[in-house]
Image (tube, rainbow, N blue to C red):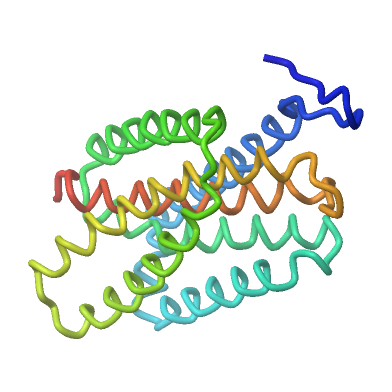
Amino acid sequence: MERMNMEDGIDIRPNNTLLARTFFWMFLGLLGTGIVAWYTYATGMFETIMTEGFFWGILATQLIVVLLFSFLFMKLPAIVVGIMFFTYAFLTGLTFSSIFYLYELGSIAYIFVGTSGLFGVLGFIGYTTKADLSRWGNILFPALIIGIIMSVVNMFMGNSILQLGLTWVMLIVFCGLVIYDLNKLKNLQNQEGVDQSKLHIHAAMMLYLDFINIFIRLLWLFGKRR
């Protein structure tokens, strides 16, 4: 439904162009990750990455890139932000190639399709709901931080029951973030003071991260291992 606030003359119609650009960038990011992951696996490059000790360096670089993206997004020009987005996507592809060693190809494909369907439903809910979801961030982000910390701790503990619980919790958190992020995108698209030229890149990164993390959790829970 198209709506116009006639009192103040501000157009508050959904910006379908912004949404399309956001999902196009997200698609390119996922495509880049998939291509790099398959190439790294097929050529045996991942074995070199592991044996030569590059894996942790790549993870550290990913963390640096995403932190720079988050904290410097407003100050950096759009082209730099775009380069950082694709850099992160390609680096993720290098580490993601490990899933081809751990899971059957058919299982990976099924989980990817399932993730896409779930993501679409959650995104539709977030973008179309009229409810105020601004308070969700006060719950989701602390839960995300706690979940990440507990996951790191459990890497040393190796508790399988805790890992199962954390996987479900993080899955729920990222599902909630899809709804929250799409709703936030809808609200930001006409807000004054927001650089609309870069907004789709930031939104694409957030949704890309949501999708990747949901896929990882579903694969861990339901994927068929080799």
Considering every residue shown, the one lying at the far top of the view is 1
The image quadrant that residue 2 belongs to is top right
Q: Residue at x 75, y 60 (%)?
A: 81
Q: Residue at the right extreme? A: 9
Picture coordinates of residue 206, whole percent (x, y): 57, 53
39 displayed left or right of 224: right
Where 122 falls versus 207 (above or below)?
above
Q: Quadrant of residue 108?
A: top left
Residue 209 picture location, percent across and down: 49, 54
Please state which of residues 117 and 35 is positioned toward the viewer in this rendering.
Answer: 117
Instruction: Please provide percent x and percent y for residue 169.
Output: 26, 58
Q: Residue at x 43, y 51 (%)?
A: 212
Q: Position of residue 75 (x, y in %)?
A: 83, 69
Q: Is residue 200 left or right of residue 114?
A: right
Residue drawn at the location 29% of the way across and 38% of the way down: 111
Q: Which of 110/173 is in front?
A: 173
